[in-house]
Amino acid sequence: MSERNEVTKVKFWTPLRLVCTVISLALLAAFGVSSCNSNDPPYNANRTAPSRPGAMVSLPRPILDAENRAANGGPIKLADYSGKVMLVNLWATWCGPCRMETPELVKLHKEYQDRGVELIGLSTEDPYASAASVAEFVKAYEVKYHIGWATREVALGLMQGRTNIPQSFIIARDGRILKRFIGFRPDATPQQIRQALDEALKS
């Protein structure tokens, strides 16, 4: 086994990640709602500018044009999907609620891909340290939608100071953020995302 793989293994299950996963699973079992705080460097910087609830904010050019590293090697640029409805999901392999949400995202992708919806999953983890775990994740969950890593600017720009994950954004054809979901509730979130996607496709 290579030295890089050994380092990756050591970094992956840190005490913080283990605690977050255990707590998240307990909360999900108790209350049906859960999220993790993304503390993956360098994506954990705090910002004080909150997004206004219900505000329809357009994605700025730096976020649209940023080249996020893709799991298949090529870059993922949100600008490449301009004119289409997008579902952008921020997640991490160590995040329990993200793992619980992924099968629902796989279903959503199957339901909406023929209707022109682009589903893009961007991990907040370090792309080098988590390359193996992301590849295993994609294989285990049979993920067919776009998977990669958010750049620091994209992660911070979308999160707007709210670093809890998972976070999902429904983006209209004209680049407006129509809806933002933070955390995952199995009894509510999938249906709410479907409703938001249907509204976006009608607009």
Image (tube, rainbow, N blue to C red):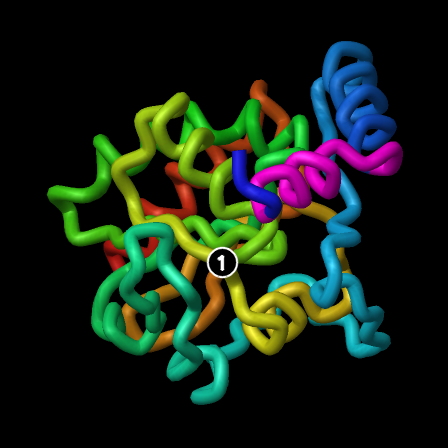
Would you place residue 100 above or below residue 13 in this image?
A: above
Q: Which residues are magenta?
A: 4-16
Q: As rendered, which of 177 and 13 lies closer to the eye?
A: 13
Q: Position of residue 43 (x, y in %)?
A: 70, 64
At label 1, counting other C-alpha atoms closer than 10 Å, the crowd grade (few under 14, some 14-19, many 20 or more) is many
**Which amino acid, by three-letter code, is at mark 1?**
Trp
Q: Is residue 23 magenta?
A: no
Q: As rendered, which of 109 and 9 lies closer to the eye?
A: 9
Q: Which residue occupies 58% across, 48% down?
A: 4
Q: As rendered, which of 89 and 116 lies closer to the eye?
A: 89
Would you place residue 169 above or below residue 176 in this image?
A: above
Q: Position of residue 150 (x, y in %)?
A: 52, 63
**Residue labelled with disc 1:** 149
140 to the left or right of 125? left
Q: Secondary structure at mark 1?
A: strand
The furthest residue to the bottom: 61
Q: Is residue 7 magenta?
A: yes
Q: Position of residue 203 (x, y in %)?
A: 28, 63
Magenta-drawn stretch, dominant element (helix, strand or loop) = helix
Q: Which residue occupies 67% across, 44% down?
A: 7
Would you place residue 7 above or below residue 48 in this image?
A: above
Q: Position of residue 120 (x, y in %)?
A: 37, 53
Would you place residue 105 above or below residue 130 in this image?
A: above
